[in-house]
Amino acid sequence: MPVTDAHRTVDAVWKLESARIVAGLTRMVHDVGAAEELAQDALVAALEQWPEKGVPDNPGAWLMAIAKRRAVDRIRRSRNLERKHELIAHGMERGTGPEPEPDGDDVLRLLFVTCHPVLATAERVALTLRLVAGLTTEEIARAFLTGEARIAQRVAAAKRTLAEQGVGFELPSGAELSERLSSVLGVVYLVFNEGYTATSGEGLTRPGLCLEALRLGRTLAELVPDEAEAHGLVALMELQQARAGARTGPSGELLRLDEQNRGRWDPLLIRRGFAAMLRARDAGGPPGPYTLQAAIAVCHAGAATAEDTDWERIAVLYDLLAERLPTPVVLLNRAVAVGRARGPAEGLALVDVLADDPALRDYHLLPGVRGDLLLLLGREGEAGREFLRAAALAGNAVERAFLLGRAETVAGPRPEGPTLGSLSRDFLGRPDLDAATVRSYGQTLGRLCRSLGEDLPAADLDAGAVARVFAAAWGEAAPRTWNRHRSAVRSFGAWAGLEGLDTGLGRRAEARTGAPPLDPAQLALLWDGEGRALRERVLWRLLHESGAGVGAVLALNVEDLDLEDRRARSGGSWVHWRSGTARLLPRLVAGRERGPLFLADRRPGPARRPAEADLCPVTGRGRLSYPRAEYLFKQAGRELDPAGEGYTLRRLKG
Amino acid sequence: MRFLMTTKPSDTAADENLYTEMAAFVEELTASGVLLATGGLEPGGLRLTSAGGEITVTDGPFTEAREVVAGFALVEVRSREEALEVARRFRRIVGDGESVVQQVFGP
């Protein structure tokens, strides 16, 4: 067999078998990271042997056998037994004799681990696709239109967290079971949704992700046959997927549910959805959120034509769903159903309540729905504006085109006179504003335009609307941020002759405390992290130990250092350090006698040659810049920061 | 990607063992969401031919029984290789004979 064919066969076998193999290995070694490594070893062996000897009769069992053998080898090799290895060996001994074959429960346990609540959501998704669905990091990255490094980082962070928190491989029970199960269901549905309506990019869907989610869901439902919600989720996904082929028209444009050709709905998936729904009902109990959403999907799937849709029943189901799961998106959909069942005015009232919710601030469907309801009420001008606003917010090209099309068909007479958008552009285009001010004001006005619509006639712009946008956008922001945007509005209002535009915006007192310093555990992880360069380790420790400003520390020269007394002169003051820096400094200095202490990675290009004082006389490299140092620290901190953003160097000050 | 796997009738008689293995295989593929539909087909059946607007219906069995399909499976997989792997496992269970795997386009 040619090597490339073997490669593809190994890949196919792996994707079909990975869940069971990794799950079986995890039961042996109690660590998903180690289990995955062992499985990877087995894959390498397959790539070496299959091209010559052919694919074995039972490739899954072959891979499992090799991986188990590697596990035993590994334990024998590592004679300096750490506690963890002892545990592994112990587990292996207990399991001697015929190793029980991996069973479905192992896969279920694995799912509970990869979707564990101690992990961040993005980590759960990445780890589940990696270990249970058997996708490579590259495939996951492509599916989510992100970098491979980022996915690899998420997977690594997830494995580390699981190991640190000592997450076990037992099946949860009782109250914990339902919490853990809902986390698994959440991950599966998130993958499905990302595939069903891609949040970014050119294409509307990424069918691969939908398929992965369907598979995961179907597998899960078989593993927990008594859990109604697992079947509910499967029913929901099957029914939504059944419509996938009918959601776009001949030129790729998005079609609304009532415009779709129902003959193109996939009857096979509809039948599967109905069957899953029956299983959910048989499992009993009050219907949960997924089952309720599936019931709504059943109403649509069961209607032969759009006119036959039982909106009254759908509105009732949404009322129930809104009690169980009052997320902004559910509430918005409920408003749509209520609008259909009980009249557009009632629907619009529900939407307007939601308009102030910060979570829906940039959700393009909100103005989209509002536009629909306004249109039904005959308020065409407003409807057109809402569609334009929705189009500006949509992240997906197909949806954007659809919304622009809607706006065009209803566009009433263009508003006369200046609009919010035209005034904003004129205001920002004034020659007397400097670049920084333009950028700052631009943020404020851009937000107003996105939230209120660029085409809003200036005459309709009132302080109440501005105050609502502010509350939703910056209500939780730092006082400084709030005040900055507030002064932008004041300046804009004064310029445009719209006095009192800021009457709803009080000035906020600015506290002088910044973000708290990092705690010792985080610091240790930062400087002892794998693969950290010496330069970074010295810089970060020095900043931490000295409490000096970042600029002052980067300005240090080798000739300023007083290694004996652990201090250096920077400008007019002294920078002092302690033992951590002192230990590392000599290695960084490395025999240099003068020039910048912290050097850039490369020599500067001829066009950007810095001053002589900022060049190393030995290597010709320039001084490490503040932005570069800040960037490197942000990158390193990203893994530790629960928000995934990393930290600024200032946070190092002890 | 969906693939239709069709299988031609074979001479080997099915024994108890084959039925058990096959049941387990079908169960496993259904559980993992790969197998969407499967079934066996009657030998013979009806044949319809249209020529010049005229439709002729013929009752089976037909002489070229070898070309007839005896069973099918509709699977949903990530790639052609995966479809092939599933079919390979199927063939290993049923023994000598012939199957055809074709990608399904649409709906």
Image: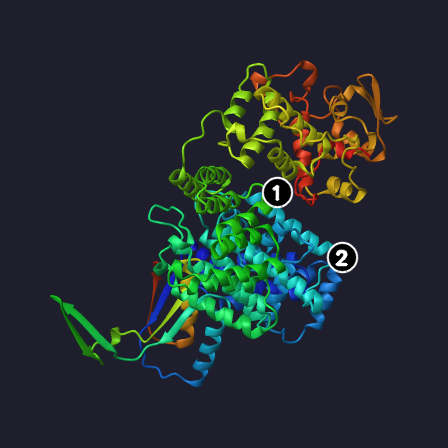
Q: Secondary structure at mark 1?
A: loop
Whether residue A68 appears in this view of the structure is no
Q: Residue at x 43, y 81 (%)?
A: B18
**In-image side of B45 versus A141 (left or right):** left
Give residue A176's position: percent from left, percent from top. 70, 65
Give the vertical position of A97 relative to A165 (above or below).
below
Q: Nearer the viewer, residue A463 or A454?
A: A463
Give residue A613's position: percent from left, percent from top. 70, 15
Name the kind of residue labelled 1 in the image. Asp
- The quadrant of the rendering that contains the N terminus of chain A is bottom left
Residue A356 - label: 1
Image label count: 2
Give the vertical position of B38 relative to A87 (above or below).
below
Whether residue A257 appears in this view of the structure is yes
In the rendered structure, the residue with mark 2 lies on which chain? A
Which residue is under mark 2?
A80
Q: Nearer the viewer, residue A619 or A568?
A: A568
Q: Nearer the viewer, mark 1 or mark 2?
A: 1
Q: Secondary structure at mark 2?
A: loop
Give residue A71's position: percent from left, percent from top. 64, 62
Residue A606 - label: none
Distance between the alpha carbons at the discs numbered 1 and 2: 61 Å
Q: Residue at x 61, y 33 (%)?
A: A466
N-terminal-most mark, 1 or 2: 2
Give the vertical position of A107 relative to A552 (above or below).
below
Name the kind of residue labelled 2 in the image. Asn
Q: Residues within 10 Å of mark 1 (few under 14, many from 20)?
A: some
- The quadrant of the rendering that contains the C terminus of chain A is top right
Q: Nearer the viewer, residue A443 or A640?
A: A443
Q: Residue furthest right?
A: A565
Give residue A351's position: percent from left, percent from top. 55, 47
